[in-house]
Amino acid sequence: MFLVLFSNMPKLIDTHSHLHFPRFDEARTQALERMQREDIWTITVSTTMKNGPGAVELADSSDLVWASLGYHPYHFTNAREEPDEGAPGEYSIAEIERLARSSKRVVAIGETGIDFHHVDKKWTLEQALKLQKDPFVEQIKLAEKLNLAVIIHCRDAFPQLIEAIQELKAACTKIRGVVHCFGESWEVAKPLLDLGLLISFTGTITFPVRKKDDPERHVHRVVEKMPLERIMIETDAPWLAPEAHRGERNEPVFVEEVAKKIAELRGLTFDQVAKQTTQTAREFFRI
């Protein structure tokens, strides 16, 4: 891992939010003020060609914000427009590269990945994989070219994701990647860790364990088992507010609840988790 000595270390880094999305238009200034008071940074992540410029603009305007640029797999196989994202625009790896080169505040490519959770009925999963995999590979190779991290999204397609990354590594592609918003079992997490990836957790780990959940296959076991230095924390704001803020619009300062839960599960202090996850995030994203 890239090592560097840091001076002004923030308390926490929310490694994945969408602070530039329209949901924050009426409250972004206040959210940034709360981040300033709580000493929290965030990486605001784009998901389409249309909302990428907004991520860079916000990052360029605030010392608390960094940007990631990518095209979400959802938009290759689902025609429904997400209200928070707007029209996705036509995918262009050249435009992602141009925008990434436009600002030193861009620290990652993504989110990109493979997602079978919402696929239009007109596509088979085999067709969906083809439509999503080629751009996923393109975005990873762009990250390698620009020496940037990769933020990886996956839902209901982990075997396909793992195979794609194995193929890339076999071709000597260098991948500095994190699987964001992880909520699976240790059986899913271990192959990802073996591939050298990091794993990031959201406020979903603070939700009460349901009676129908198998305790041994719960994401809490992953939090407990995996090396602390391979963990990052995030909010995925404006979605997935932690249990203490259920029903509210999620925002970067709520990442503190994720750190608290990790500390509880691992028998550590909050300060230990905060220090390590912040150091990991700064080294990983090179910020």
Image: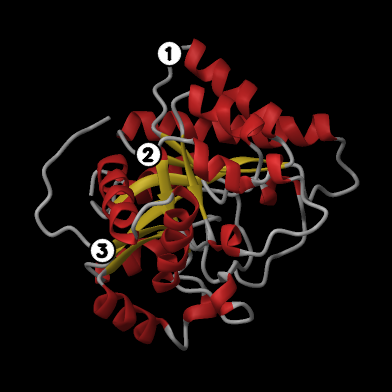
Return the disc, 1 or 2, that comes first in the chain's sequence: 2
Q: Nearer the viewer, residue 110 or 277?
A: 277
Q: Which mark is residue 149?
A: 2
Where residue 36 appears, as percent x and y from the top left, is: 25, 77
Where residue 185 appears, as percent x and y from the top left, is: 66, 39
How far apart are labels 3 and 1 at the CA level? 36 Å
The residue tagged 3 is 11
Where residue 168 appears, as percent x and y from the top left, is: 52, 19
Q: Nearer the viewer, residue 99 or 40?
A: 40
Residue positioned 57% across, 63% down in the render: 206
Give the foreground label among 2 and 3: 3
Return the disc, 3 or 1, that comes first in the chain's sequence: 3
Residue positioned 38% across, 45% down in the render: 108
**Badge 1 vs badge 2, beta-carbon distance below 8 Å:** no
Q: Nearer the viewer, residue 234 or 135?
A: 234
Do we see residue 92 in this rendering? no
Crowd around label 2: few <14 · some 14–19 · many ≥20 (10 Å): many
Q: Is residue 213 left or right of residue 16?
A: right
Do we see residue 47 in this rendering? yes
Numbered disc 1: secondary structure: loop
Numbered disc 2: secondary structure: strand
Crowd around label 1: few <14 · some 14–19 · many ≥20 (10 Å): few
Residue type, label 2: Ala
- Name the quadrant containing residue 144: top left
**Residue lying farthest right?**
121
Residue positioned 55% across, 76% down in the render: 244
The residue tagged 1 is 172
Numbered disc 3: secondary structure: loop
Give the foreground label among 3 and 1: 3
How far apart are labels 1 and 2 at the CA level? 16 Å
**Badge 3 vs badge 1, beta-carbon distance below 8 Å:** no
